[in-house]
Image (cartoon, rainbow, N blue to C red):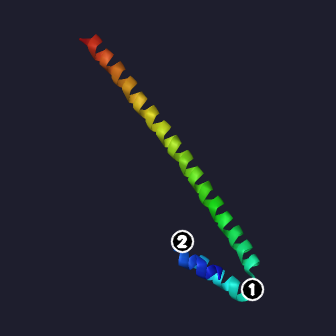
């Protein structure tokens, strides 16, 4: 019943989700199946969130490193320009 409603709704759930719902309906263990799926999807979401947070951290470190490198080259350019002007 729930499986048919989900399929009819056209909601973008993975096929594995639909199959698990159908299995839960056929066996009569819908609450247990839903609990297992909730745990699985929660763990998957936590893992993906952790990965995204780590990637964001690396991205920030990279941006700061690039800003420092650009600043070093600008300062070096100014210094070398001043030395060239002084040598003339």
Q: Is residue 83 visible?
A: yes
Horizontal arrangement in the rendering, residue 64 relative to residue 3 (left or right): left
Q: Residues within 10 Å of mark 2 (few under 14, many from 20)?
A: few
Question: Which SS class for mark 2?
Answer: loop
Q: Position of residue 87 (x, y in %)?
A: 27, 12
Q: Position of residue 21 (x, y in %)?
A: 65, 80
Q: Is residue 39 above or below residue 24?
A: above
The image quadrant that residue 32 belongs to is bottom right
At 39% across and 23% down in the image, what residue appears?
Answer: 75
Horizontal arrangement in the rendering, residue 40 relative to residue 51 (left or right): right
Residue projecting furthest to the left: 88
Q: Is residue 20 visible?
A: no
On the image, numbered disc 1 is attached to which residue?
Answer: 28
Alpha carbon separation for disc pair 2 and 1: 23 Å
Between disc 2 and disc 1, whose residue precedes? 2
Q: How many marks?
A: 2
Q: Which disc, if any, is residue 87?
A: none
Q: Position of residue 4 (x, y in %)?
A: 59, 82
Question: Which SS class for mark 1?
Answer: loop
The image quadrant that residue 31 belongs to is bottom right
* Residue contact between numbered discs 2 and 1, judged by CB atoms under 8 Å: no
Q: Is residue 69 above or below residue 84?
A: below
Between 38 and 70, the residue placed more toward the observer is 38
Between 40 and 8, the residue placed more toward the observer is 8
Between 45 and 12, the residue placed more toward the observer is 12
Q: Which disc, if any, is residue 11?
A: 2
The image quadrant that residue 47 belongs to is bottom right
At 65% across and 59% down in the image, what residue appears?
Answer: 46
At 27% across and 13% down in the image, what residue appears?
Answer: 85
Q: Position of residue 35 (x, y in %)?
A: 74, 72
Task: Identify the image quadrant of the C terminus.
Answer: top left
């Amino acid at each position: 019943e729930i499986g048919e409603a989900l399929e009819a709704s056209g909601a973008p759930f993975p096929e594995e989700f639909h199959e698990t719902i159908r299995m839960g309906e056929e066996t009569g263990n819908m609450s247990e199946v839903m609990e297992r799926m909730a745990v699985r999807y929660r763990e998957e979401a936590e893992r993906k969130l952790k990965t995204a947070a780590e990637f964001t951290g690396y991205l920030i470190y990279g941006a700061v490193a690039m800003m420092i490198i650009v600043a070093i080259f600008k300062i070096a350019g100014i210094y070398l320009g001043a030395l060239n002007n002084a040598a003339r």
